[in-house]
Image: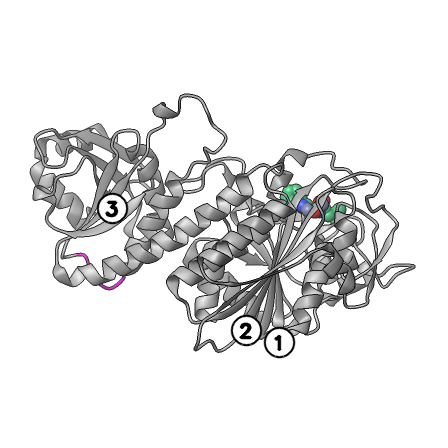
Amino acid sequence: MKGAVTRGKIATHATGMLVVFTYEDKETAEYKTVEKALKAELAELKKSKEFEGKKLQAAMLRTPKQKFKKVLLLGLGKQKEMSIETLRRAAGSAAKIAREFSAELTIPFLASTSVKGLSEAVQAITEGLVLGHYRFLQYKTQNLEEIKFLKNFTILVEAASQQGAAKKGLERGMILSEAANYTRDLVNIPAMDMHPASLEAAARKLAKQHKLGFKVFQAPELKKRKMNAILAVGQGSAIKPRMLILEYKKPGAKQHLIFCGKGVTYDAGGYNIKMKMMEYMKDDMGGAAALLGMLSALAQLKVKAHVTVIIGAVENLISGDAYKPGDVVKAMNGKTIEVLNTDAEGRIVLADCLSYASTLKASKIIDIATLTGAAMVALGPIAAAVCSPSDKIAESIVAAGEVSGDRAWRIPMWDDYKEDIKSDIADVKNLGFQFYAGITAGATFLQEFVEKPEKWAHIDIGAAVFEERERPYIPKGATGWGVRILTNYVENN
Ligand code: BES
Ligand code: ZN
Ligand code: ZN
């Protein structure tokens, strides 16, 4: 979908679909302008109570006598409760309704709309449209001609002074939402076509496209570097594990941020084979995919930053070669891990990624992983869990979530839980006590492989990675969680 900012007036701008936002308790200037042209029609609509401007309520009118051929009214609810996220969601709904009736739409901003905040509003609308419009069609073959698309949208501004801010918002919104849609694609692709070698190919392609540094440690190199943890998890697969290292560096960066991503391209659980949700486990590389999307956004936005991404790409399967419950593996930092459950493999993979990250000079290390089902129980799909010994890092991640729309919530890391990951025969075990404090247990384990925990945070997207229902701008399937929040975090930290 293409977007553009155009200067003009509602009455004289030709479009197939005009989208007008308005409040429940106050009509917006845009609504009032349209009302002047459509007095009778809108009076009738008001009387019918079919549309009252309630949050995400929608109504469509055909207006053949106007330059705009249809009007889609979208409610934003009460003005006081309006947020940038409401706008994003309303735009998501608008995209899904509008595409059934028109290949293009126009969203107007009158000169009376305050220019302050215009850029953020246009960005949110763009994100809502592009994210809401997303569908994963790569594997569909039938009746494709019946699927309708929006091809273009126009942000119509009245005053020249609005153009700059609107263009900036549009450009940011496009980059962030298209990067998130790229991440969604990577996650939605079935594991048969997105295995460690294909994840490597995707990362290589991205690196080439954006001139990023790119390095792969193949299995012999992993062995040489004593990365036996990631090797153990991948032992049961014919496609060998590998570590992918990408680097984005722009002059002027104050810090070196390192991100580690769980790239388990399929998680059958290993010998502790999954009893449920195995059909979702192609999404177990969602952390890695989010980091690739973030790199794409950072490069296009030309953010002044130095960012290294480390991805553990591996498949967790069963075979005569697979690692077994009870095995003890030694991670790169020398610590031994007793594998009490082969399905808690993400933390084993990350043990080597974090050990390696700790050898590079990092200002901060953040890992992102579909680590636990416990994240589903604690928060559901609408937020990821953040664990960090540092209040400051945890708080700035949560804050980036509020601005970007990728929500995050902090889960404590009390020291008490360190006891629970002690092993009888090795340094640590990959399980906590029973299923208690699952998110914290995972984070407490990971902390053992970070040299400076006070500069580290862990993000568990076990639930946020995938949506089984549908939300206004999040279709069923991969959510793309992480691209918008992490890009925002890098820009502001
Ligand atoms: N990839 C899963 C976590 C997961 C499960 C994400 C369901 C999304 C949906 C992870 O590798 C896993 O299996 N974790 C175990 C850990 C447990 C054995 C300590 C879990 O959460 O059940
Ligand atoms: Zn698992
Ligand atoms: Zn997993």
Q: Is residue 455 above or below residue 17?
A: below
Q: Is residue 115 magenta?
A: yes
Please identify the quarter of the rendering in which residue 216 is found: bottom right
Q: Residue 58, percent across and down?
A: 29, 35
Please identify the quarter of the rendering in which residue 68 is found: top left
Q: Which class describes the residues within 10 Å of circle 3: few (<14), some (14-19), or many (20+)?
A: some
Q: Disc 2, disc 1: CB below 8 Å?
A: yes
Q: Residue 479, percent across and down?
A: 50, 44
Q: Residue 467, percent across and down?
A: 53, 40
The residue identified by callout 3 is: 25
The stretch of residues the image draws in magenta is 113-118
Q: Earlier in the sequence, mark 1 or mark 3?
A: 3
Q: Looking at the picture, tell me which residue is in the foreground, 484 or 218.
A: 218
Real-space CA distance between mark 3 and mark 2, rounded to the nearest whole angstrom: 48 Å
Q: Is residue 345 visible?
A: yes
Q: Secondary structure at mark 3?
A: loop
Toward the right, the furthest residue is 425
Amino acid type of disc 1? Lys
Q: Looking at the picture, tell me which residue is in the foreground, 145 or 451.
A: 145
Q: Residue at x 16, y 38 (%)?
A: 15
The residue identified by callout 1 is: 361
Q: Is residue 41 magenta?
A: no
* Left or right: 488 as drawn, with respect to 165: right
Real-space CA distance between mark 2 and mark 1, rounded to the nearest whole angstrom: 7 Å
Q: Residue 213, percent across and down?
A: 53, 65
Tell me the number on the disc at residue 189: none
Q: Looking at the picture, tell me which residue is in the foreground, 213 or 66.
A: 213
